[in-house]
Image: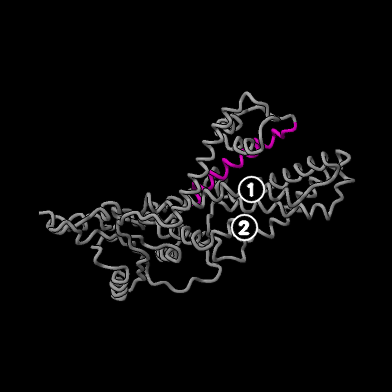
Amino acid sequence: MHELLVPFPVLDATSKPAAGLLSGTVADFGDYDECIEVELPKRNGDIEFRGMYCAIEARPLMPPTPRNFSMAKNSHAEPLDNIAKDLWIAGAAFHYLRFRLGVCVPSTCTLEDMQSIFERISDVVEMDIQVPQCYVKEKSVLTTIHFVVIFILSLFLLICIIGSIVDHQSTEASNQNLSTLRKIFICFSMTTNFRRLMCSSKGSEELKALHGLRALSMGWIILGHTYVWINYQLLRGSETIIAWFNQIQFSAILNGWMSVEPFFFLSGFLTSYTVLKIMNKTKGRINVPIYIFRRYIRLTPPLLLTIGLLFFLPLISSGPVWYERVDPELRACTNYWWTSLLYISNWSTMRNIVSAIKPLHSTLIDDKWMIVLPVEQILFDFHNLTSSRFSRSRVTLKSTRVAEILNGRLRLDF
């Protein structure tokens, strides 16, 4: 009886013509989870085949995209225009859009089989049909990179536990009586670090006004990414999005590309401010390599953790749009992870690896402020200028401006 019922979930999981086509709905992914859960067992207990989910992208045959073509300039028809203008606008949208569907088939088929089948179908219906990826439920297999990440995380956890125990045993002892090894372990103490993290005391030299600027900018970035960092053709009734752009409250999102600029200003300002504080204490001297090394040590461990955890995503989930969202990130990280450790993966001269860990682009750019320090030393005489408040402000503003120029030359991929 089970063998007779297998075709029903396969057909049920396959996409159907999407309702709301005239209102901009061009995607219906079917039921991905239902498809990959389909199994046909043999009498000996083995699996004869499983459900295989294949993503389908289709669009009408289109002429080459005109030069300087923009949907924003051609997305509205005047009241006196004829129906041909509306049809032209709707058809021109397929320069950027595709019908997105999902087909559930037995796993005895292959990706090449599906591509060959839909290539013949596309010749008959005169449409451009692509099968970019197919997915079959498989057992999660840990690879070498997974074991390396687990080992490193376990090692750090062990050090943190040892550091917490050492810290607990050393609470009554003076820091001067502690050995260097004990002090190193206490640096990893979870209790001490948690108290420092939760501490709300403020230093006398803290620039409190910058916290408000940072909070507002972060809220602006989150708001912009919520509405912009998405694929609009995956939404239902996407035609209503056009009305958003005519609303004044949406202007904050349309101009969200400027939300990251305050962080670049803060990076340049705080870098200059910190350097000046150090030079005031050291009589105009600063060890630039040590300063850059300390910054690198602070940023790199969280970056390594982010890269390492990214490799575990395929083990915990999957989905119908992973081939365009997650899989490229995984390939980029697998092949070019070292560029992120060198903080060069966002350079425009490396377009083939710029996709690696996109959310970290701001951190990678922020780290390049350290390049400004030698420039500050060469262009400005810190030893003479840091003696007065006026000169200190002038150096801070000048160094911030130099940092902005340098950052503008490095941020060609934005």
Q: Residue at x 53, y 36 (%)?
A: 162
Q: Position of residue 377 (x, y in %)?
A: 82, 52
Q: How many marks?
A: 2
* Quarter assignment of residue 252: top right
Q: Foreground residue, 314 or 216?
A: 314
Q: Secondary structure at mark 2?
A: loop
Image-quadrant location for residue 248: top right
Residue 367 located within the stretch drawn in magenta:
no
Is tag 2's residue or tag 1's residue first in the polypeptide sequence? 1
- Whether residue 247 is situated above or below residue 351 in the rendered picture: above
What mark, if any, has residue 342 been given in the picture?
A: 2
Give the farthest residue toward the top.
172
Residue 131 appears in view: yes
Quadrant for the N terminus, please.
Answer: bottom left
Mark sitting on residue 355? none
Q: Amino acid at mark 1?
A: Ile
Q: Position of residue 212 (x, y in %)?
A: 65, 35
Residue 411, percent from left and from top: 64, 58
The amino acid beneath tag 2 is Leu
Viewer-nearest residue: 369 or 11: 369
Residue 104 image position (x, y, % from top left): 26, 60
Q: Measure how far apart labels 2 and 1 are at the Cα level.
A: 12 Å
Q: Is 206 situated left or right of 98 in this image?
A: right
Q: Which residue is mark 1?
A: 297
Question: Which stretch appears magenta?
Answer: 205-229
